[in-house]
Amino acid sequence: MRNPELRDKSGLTEAEFLARYNAGDYERPSVAADMVIFTVLEEEEENYRKLPECSLCLLLIQRGGHPYLGDWALPGGFVRPGETTKAAAKRELREETGLDQVYLEQLYTFSDPGRDPRTWVMSCAHMALIDGTKIRLKAGDDADNAQWFKVSLLLLDEHVEYCRDAGFGQVKLIRTQHLELELVRGEIRLKCRLEKRIRKSEYEEAAECRICENDGLAFDHAKIIVAALERLRGKLEYTDLALHLMPEEFTLTQLQQVYEVIWDKSLLKAAFRRKVASMVQETDSYTKNEGHRPSRLYRRRWEE
Ligand SMILES: O=P(O)(O)OC[C@H]1O[C@@H](O)[C@H](O)[C@@H]1O
């Protein structure tokens, strides 16, 4: 039981201390919640016998006011009094997609000084994954100023420097990567170049990312998108996260396509099926697409 009469070095009880506390003694940042909302959308396919091509897409909003007027930005906004950052992220998600029962995880807090030209703003970034069939705004639709952009991240080059005589705890290796982030929707093509440096010592791995060129993306949102993509790609290795991008029932070929667009590489069918075998379970249903041989439908397996 806490003793309310306990006094500190200045002779104050906690109630007296709180009554005199001046929050203005320390400068306070504003806090924003930004959302990287990923989905996988099918592209129009002229040949109905071929499986439709899929793309990894994310939602961007064209800014209607300063700063960055006319540039594209992640959906996001300031956290309101009484709200957690997660609640603010969910509110943004609901406003932009009409959905709230979706996978959502916190990514990182972006706090570079000067990241917002207005004032001191930290962004608590989140990543959401949405099943493409639930989306009302399809890539290419003209609805408001929110659009799905096809996203790709290319490793342009990589350079590793070994610090041979580094002592205990000192940096042993510096990996420098140059990345190109591209976001495309119809005629709109946003390109950003970034440099990422990963420093590794015996007990620490620290990465910093810098935007070198930026054409059309607001704030440091290119960095947030890269962090989200890397998190998504990494987590696919050891979790069933991709299933959040699938409808309730899906074919294994559709699931493989989702892994392939996220990892941006082709996978061998047999190895892929072994990888996902424990994550999915067969249903009794088959696809009914004309032009294709019916394929077995699967759903997410919930039991451990
Ligand atoms: O869109 P408004 O409300 O102007 O400002 C919110 C944005 O300000 C930035 O620091 C954040 O990253 C967030 O996206």
Image (tube, rainbow, N blue to C red):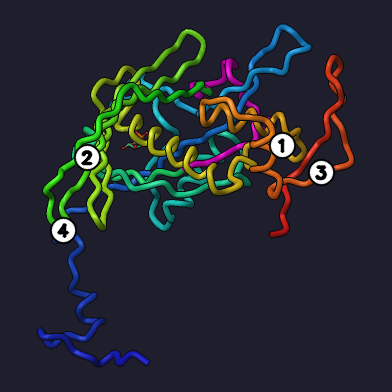
Badge 3 amino acid: Glu
Give 34 or 54, whichever is nearer the viewer: 54
**Residue 63 in sight here:** no
Is 211 left, or right, of 290 in this rendering? left
Label 2's element? Answer: strand
Q: Give the crowd class for mark 4: few <14, some 14-19, many >=20 residues within 10 Å.
A: few
Decide which of tag 4 and tag 2 comes sooner along the chain.
Answer: 4
**Front-lying residue, 72 or 235:** 235
Point 50% across, 45% down: residue: 235
Judged from the image, the quadrant occupied by ligand 1 is top left
Label 2 C-beta lies within 8 Å of the nearest ligand 1 atom: no
Q: In which quadrant is the N terminus drawn?
A: bottom left
Q: Position of residue 237 (x, y in %)?
A: 53, 43
Q: Earlier in the sequence, mark 1 or mark 3?
A: 1
At label 4, the amino acid type is: Phe
Q: Quadrant of residue 209?
A: top left
